[in-house]
Amino acid sequence: MDETTGTITHIESIYDEKHVPVGIPIKNGNVDRAALNQWWTGRAIPASRMDIDRVLWDLQMPGTSLLLEKCMGLSLSDQYWIRLANSEVKWEQVNFFQNSFSEDMGDLLFGSKSPDQDFDLMSPDNTSDGWLKKKWKIVGGKRCLIKGGSGATQQEPYNEIFASRLMERLGIEHVPYSLLVEEGYPYSICEDFVTLEIELISAWHIMQSYKKPNHLSWYQHFLNCCTALEIPNIQAAMDRMIVLDYLIANEDRHQNNFGVIRNAETLQYLGAAPIYDSGTSLWFNKPKTMINNQTKISCKPFKSNHEEQLKLVKSFDWLDFTALQDIEEEFREIVNGSLFIDEERCGAICAAIKERVKKLKDFVDTRSKSGLQDDVCFDVTEDVAYNGSN
């Protein structure tokens, strides 16, 4: 590795091809170095992260990729890491699942600490993605992610809790979120669902496992890749994710914030990852006058609008509309006492949620006449996973 740029310059040997990160091509025993570099630098904090310019200035570093070496590439999302060639340090001694880590970087990202001579960069915050302010913290022995909001409404944390409660009502497997308020500011907090044995692989990397034929939609290509990799129960999981994202008007379910899980040792795929990262939703950055179901909102990961994406759902048999009765009141209860969301904005969001449920019910009632549809004209672009989103 080039320590000046933080990039991989040469691959000396491959010990086990099966453990090369998913989606990175191997031809004639040679790993695609460009793809491996993209995977490696993709582990770093994105340049779009809130206040990252200030953080890099304080650390006197030109870019976030140089932070990777400071924590040996260790993450709380998977089990990959690096070490110096002459080092005898072992995984059991340093991984963040079993060992404590410094909170210095997280505090710096939150603006509550400045670098000093004892500043410790051995932190999973060096390998956290997304643009929102976030940090890892050990709470009661559990690895927890704390994430803030943005703009005047600071709405994303409230949205995470709402989505979590909605999924609990519908029996959708998800990461539970709770609300943390510090100095009046809302934060979402959740426990890490990745463990010492289980790793997360993004949908984007799954989709790089095989070349997509031009005539196939991105959705069908994703399903085909999952079938080829023998990942179980993916279509049912996608049905639920697409319905959730419709109900909460999610604008940023890009291909890098959902995925699958597998055993890191045996490499056996276990299925879809529980749904997480749903904060960029519920008209979070729209003025009150635009909080309605007529306002055009963007959509990912497969189609450019939610109505087209909803057509991909194979079955609604699992969907219990009685469980959604008065779901909008959950949002009202969550934001009660917020310094950022007033009653008028709350009322507009609650009305829009209620209308969203009604529109979904109307769609399901007429669905039997049209069947599943997958029009490639409405497909998203390939690189949505690398736009620095959430």
Image: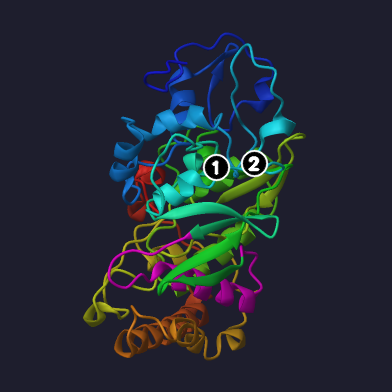
Q: According to the image, label 2 marks what residue? A: 96
Q: Is residue 311 left or right of residue 223?
A: left
Residue type, numbered disc 2: Phe
Q: Amino acid at mark 1?
A: Pro
- The foreground one among 319 and 181 is 181
The mark found on residue 189 in the picture is none
Instruction: Point out the image quarter for the C terminus.
Output: bottom left
Q: Position of residue 59 (x, y in %)?
A: 36, 35
Residue at image x 71%, y 37%?
264
**Quadrant of the rendered image containing residue 351:** bottom left
Along the viewing direction, whichever of 72 and 31 lies nearer the viewer: 72
Residue at the outermost right position: 266
- 335 in magenta: no
Q: Which of the marked residues, 2 or 1, is nearer the chain's N terminus?
A: 2
> Residue 87: where, in percent of width, then height?
65, 16
Pointer 2 with pointer 1, Cβ within 8 A:
yes
Residue under the point 44% across and 13% down: 9
The spot of residue 121 in percent (x, y) is 50, 36
Q: Which residues are magenta?
A: 147-175
**Is residue 18 at all visible to an observer of this figure?**
yes
Q: Is residue 165 magenta?
A: yes
Q: Residue 368 or 236: which is nearer the viewer?
A: 236
The residue labelled by disc 1 is 124
The residue positioned 32% from the left and 62% from the top of the image is 298
Label 2 neighbourhood size at 10 Å, few (<14), some (14-19), many (20+)?
Answer: many
